[in-house]
Image (cartoon, rainbow, N blue to C red):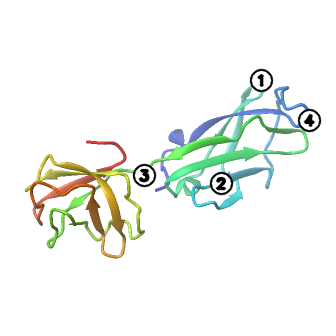
Amino acid sequence: MGEPSAQRRIVPVYLVDATDGQTPETGVVMAAGEGKVTKADGSTANAAGTLTEIARGLYTYTFTAAELNIAGFISFDFSDAGARTKEPVVVQVMPPATYGTVQVGSTQTAIILESGASAVDDYYNDMFILISGGPGAGLSQPIFNYVGATRTVTPKNPFDVTPNGSSTYVIGVVPF
């Protein structure tokens, strides 16, 4: 899920004096272990991205693609002997839209996705599925449950038409 474009991985960071917590800090260079990234799964690791000074305590942090490999909220925090982040930077990593062909065996209440779909249970929960082509085209439902082992989506409500092997789908984080 890591974003390949560095321009889309940049976040603003405000560094202040570690003692008073107010005075903007300039000239800070991030050394190993001074930056921390915490992911939605609760894991924390040393920051591997780049901290770049702009002016008067304002910096940017460029996450690495690997740091953005889990959907959900991620934070960046910095602290050394003289400077720290005024507040941790928190951003949301959004999974990319998923496209595919509905698999044979799907019903109005159980849509089987392609084999390339996530194998993680609940991965698509609370997202939306749109039947984009074939039987059921134009119908959309919130996803109530997802079983990764079988690649099966349970929509919140049954579809009015049964999608089949000639139907295509799009899954995204916003309603269609």
Element at label 4: loop
First of labels 3, 2 by sequence position: 2
- Mark 3 surroundings within 10 Å by alpha-carbon count, few (fewer than 14), some (14 through 19), many (20 or more): many
Number of residues whose C-alpha sits closer than 10 Å to that of mark 1, classed few (under 14), some (14–19) or many (20 or more): some
Residue located beneath label 3 in the image: 95
Point out the tag, 1 or 2, that comes first from the N-terminus. 2
Between marks 3 and 1, how big is the CA–CA gap? 34 Å
Identify the disc placed on residue 19: 4
Q: Which mark is residue 162?
A: none
User: N-terminal of the two: label 4 or label 3?
Assistant: 4
Instruction: Identify the mark nearer the N-term, 4 or 1.
Output: 4
Q: Nearer the viewer, mark 3 or mark 1?
A: 3
Check if mark 1's residue and mark 2's residue have beta carbons within 8 Å.
no
Assess whether mark 2 and mark 3 are in contact (beta carbons under 8 angstroms): no
Q: Earlier in the sequence, mark 3 or mark 1?
A: 1
Q: Secondary structure at mark 2?
A: strand
Residue at left offset 34%, top offset 65%: 146
Left or right, 168 with respect to 2, comes to left
Along the horizontal axis of the image, is 98 left or right of 137?
right
The residue type indicated by label 2 comes to Thr
Q: Which residue is mark 2?
A: 38
Amino acid under disc 4: Thr
- Residue at the extreme front: 157
Q: Amino acid at mark 1?
A: Arg
**How busy is the neighbourhood of tag 4: few (under 14 within 10 Å), some, or many (20 plus)?**
few
Residue at the disc numbered 1: 56
Q: Are marks 3 and 1 in contact (CB under 8 Å)?
A: no
